[in-house]
Amino acid sequence: MRLVAIYTKEHFQFPESLLNLGGKYIYDVKHKEDNKYEITRLPNINYIENFWGNNISLVSAIVGENGAGKTSLFRNINRRFSPYDRQEKIFDSIFIFENLLDDSYCYFSEKFEVENISKIEKNEVETLYYSPVIDYDLIDINSPISMIYHHSESISTYYLQNIQRHLFFLKNTDLLESLKKSYEHFPFYEKLTIKANNLYKDDFERVYIQTTIGNNFYRVRNDLMEKASRQSFCFENEKAVEDFFNKHKGVQEELKEIWETYKNPDGFSTTLHNGKDFVKNLEVNILSFLVINDTFAITGNNGNYDFNKILEAEKFADKLHHFFNKYIIQTSNFFYDVLKNGQDDLKIEESEILLKQLREQDGLQGGTFGGGFKIEDINRTVKNHILIFRSILDFYNQINRFIDEESTTEIEGGIEIDIQKLDLEVFNKFIETYEFLKDKLTDSLPNKSKDILEIKSTKKLSTGEKALIDLYSSVYDYLKRFGDHQYNENCIFLLDEADLGFHPDWKKKYVNALTTTLPILLNSVKDKIKNIQIIFATHDPLTLSDIPNKNVVYLKRDGFTTEILSENQKPKKSFGANITDLLADSFFVKDGLIGDFAKDKIEEVIKYLNDNESLITETAEAKQIIDIIDEPILKYKLEDMYFEKFPEEYDLEKEKEEIRKRAIELGIITE
């Protein structure tokens, strides 16, 4: 069955309204009594059977000004028929459906009754709403394929999750080949590159300077010395404070020493590395983050660790080992000694044993240290350090394993991964580790600098190509991952300006791309979906020119309410119509099709030529504006007015034209 009409009695944005979506019939709804209604219908003389092909029963468009209520309309439909929308609000609506196997029709309503027509259950139809826009106001439109559904706190995380969905989709080569065979312009990419993000030194130094670690280092030290002189605080006396601070290098000093060990062979640079040695670049990125995160509460139980051990270690794993011990002993000397359990130091590889000790070891659970510091708080901090360093080591090992994989080729400054050879499970595990690491290590830096890695496709995709892959990969991800969901035979896609950001050439292809490839995508995963219906909202005349006029719903904003134009009020042209006519008639463009800026300039020229008050004060300025106008009739009329006002200019212009023609004849200039 297909949704062909919606009657709404009352909505905050729409008065009583009826919209027809272009089915076999045009429907009308009349109130009879109480909650009872009557439906009548007349044949749609423009209806063509199997017009869309490929199991697509109907394609309709919603057109309207900004704020006219296109999204509100989708929200109403989705709340009624999406199995993922749990909102209980009931709208005063009647949804009318046509059966595909015979000439009958049926309806669904939670509030109203229609006599002599069968009523369906809401679970006989399923809607999937999609918008490419990340907008807080769309959160309440629950849909597992909409981009807001995938959005997380970080734009970086959102980007990586998009990449994961792309790979999940693009690895299905049979599906991709079918899509490309049906629609040759279908976008794809075959390889990914992973490089160490080239971070700026001053971003790290700024973190130091803008915190109390930098600005107030000496003030904090002096305050502690003053307190220690009067009472036993975290330190026994002033000398203990002095010794403590003397044993700890400043963050800036540690950063510079780390950067010196990974010295850029190209000489002085504002970035951490030169981007040429992937593994070394990655190492200096991680170590720099460890330096600026190397902070701890002064409890009086803090130990010391020689930073030179980190600098002198040749291998990254050894540097990481020393950093790990430094983090733990600085947090608590007591915890460090207990966790060592008689060994020389702590090992990241034994993280599970260390975590078990934190959970079970006597003395590491409750109570307080001197100064009132709770042992459970220190336990939590130490646990966090263990988890972070374990993730760093896992992450580093995963990268090195990637380098040796069959799917990977080493390139300058990074690795290139063949998507078809990639083990997706391994890649997803790697991304999971990386995400945890980013979340724990990189919060201090500006957004762009929060990424330790740069992950992107080798093929530069346009905004439109990305948008189409986002849509298809999101649908594919939903169909595959929700395998236990009892999909309905009837699926309605609600596409809310999914063509946003498309180049005009891609807008022309939009409807054709959807109708030729969406059925292939759905059938490749779930053959239970027998009938597909598409309803999309658009602002674009190129897209609308693919839709028969009876299939277009026009929303016209009138103050705080919206009018749904009746059949008699609607513009008369859409399918195959001239773009200029569509802009003028269908998109409610007021005052012509010239931009307001150009219109204002032209009006000032007209005022000047008519001797009215104008912003133009010089004859030359008026002539320059006339010369750049490309609309021939308008330009001719303005030139006529100009030469009528300045006849001497006409003679001069004629003389210039004669000279130009003669120069062309003599071959001095070309036309």
Image: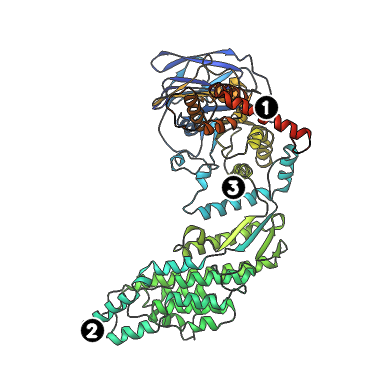
Which percent across, then down, holds residue 285?
Answer: 54, 69
Q: Give how far apart the Cα atoms at labels 3 and 2 are.
A: 65 Å
Q: Tag 1: residue type?
A: Trp
Tell me if label 2 and label 1 are in contact, CB under 8 Å: no
Residue under label 2, please give it: 229
From the image, tell me which residue sits under label 3. Answer: 481
Secondary structure state at the residue bearing disc 2: helix
Assign the C terminus to one quadrant of the image: top right
- Residue 552 seen in the current view: no
For label 3, count other residues whose C-alpha is less than 10 Å away and answer few (under 14), some (14-19) or many (20+).
few
Q: Is residue 406 above or below residue 608?
A: below
Q: Nearer the viewer, residue 618 or 411?
A: 618
Q: Where's residue 569, x and y in %?
A: 51, 16
- In-image side of 369 versus 87 (left or right): left
**Mark 3 and mark 2 residues within 8 Å of each other at the beta carbon:** no
- Mark in front: 3 vs 2: 2
In this view, which residue lies farthest toward the left? 230
Q: Amino acid at mark 3?
A: Arg
Residue farthest toward the right in the current orientation of the protein: 666
Badges 1 and 3: C-beta atoms under 8 Å apart? no
Residue 586 in percent (x, y) is at: 55, 23
Q: Nearer the viewer, mark 2 or mark 1?
A: 2
Which residue position holds label 1? Answer: 52
The answer to whether residue 118 is left or right of residue 669 is: left
Return the disc, 2 or 1, that comes first in the chain's sequence. 1
- Disc 1 to disc 3, how far (Cα)? 29 Å
Q: Quadrant of the N terminus?
A: top right
Task: Name above or below for residue 241 compared with residue 271.
Answer: below
Looking at the image, tell me whether mark 1 or mark 3 is earlier in sequence order. 1
